[in-house]
């Protein structure tokens, strides 16, 4: 942590402490409202300038992946797309021909 960050932390701490002290020492409703607004402002500034005052955001992820190897699964995959299309030899790749129209090789 460099000197600037330390200075910024001390300044944020002092602003918050001063606002809290004004809140405690407020003699009337007007001063109490003023102190409350100063405290909110100091908290807002501290959240943005000092990582210690930022809300903690924690993300936990528990992911389980199960892989089941089945030797017969390949046949199922091969049969699952009978409408698949392929490009015949020597044809333009943009002119895709349905499998039903291709001669058997």
Image (cartoon, rainbow, N blue to C red):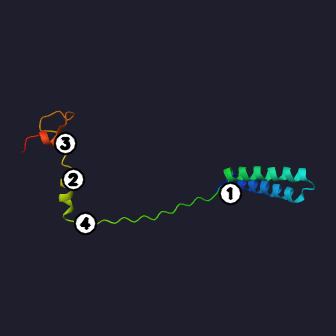
Q: Which residue is mark 3?
A: 85
Q: Mark 4 or mark 2: which comes first in sequence?
A: 4
Name which of mark 4 and mark 3 comes first in the sequence: 4
Which residue has dot 2 on it?
80
Which dot, 2 or 3, sits closer to the camera?
Answer: 2
Against 86, residue 51 (above or below) is below
The residue that mark 1 highlights is: 53
Label 4 – label 3 distance at C-alpha: 27 Å
Q: Residues within 10 Å of mark 2 (few under 14, many from 20)?
A: few
Q: Residue at x 84, y 52 (%)?
A: 35
Residue extending farthest to the right is 27
Label 1 vs 4, first from the N-terminus = 1
Q: Residue at x 85, y 57 (%)?
A: 23
Q: Identify which residue, 65 or 52, lies in the foreground.
A: 65
Name the front one of labels 1 and 4: 4
- Seen at 82% across and 55% down, the residue is 19
Name the disc covering residue 25, or none.
none
């Amino acid at each position: 942590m460099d000197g600037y960050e330390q200075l910024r932390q001390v300044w944020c701490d002092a602003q918050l402490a001063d606002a809290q002290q004004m809140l405690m020492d407020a003699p009337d409703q007007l001063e109490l409202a003023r102190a409350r607004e100063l405290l909110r402002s100091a908290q807002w500034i501290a959240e943005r300038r000092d990582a210690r005052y930022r809300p903690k955001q924690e993300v936990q992820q528990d992911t389980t992946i199960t892989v089941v190897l089945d030797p017969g699964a390949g046949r199922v995959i091969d049969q699952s797309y009978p409408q698949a299309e392929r490009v015949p030899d020597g044809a333009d790749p943009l002119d895709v021909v349905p499998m039903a129209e291709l001669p058997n090789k």
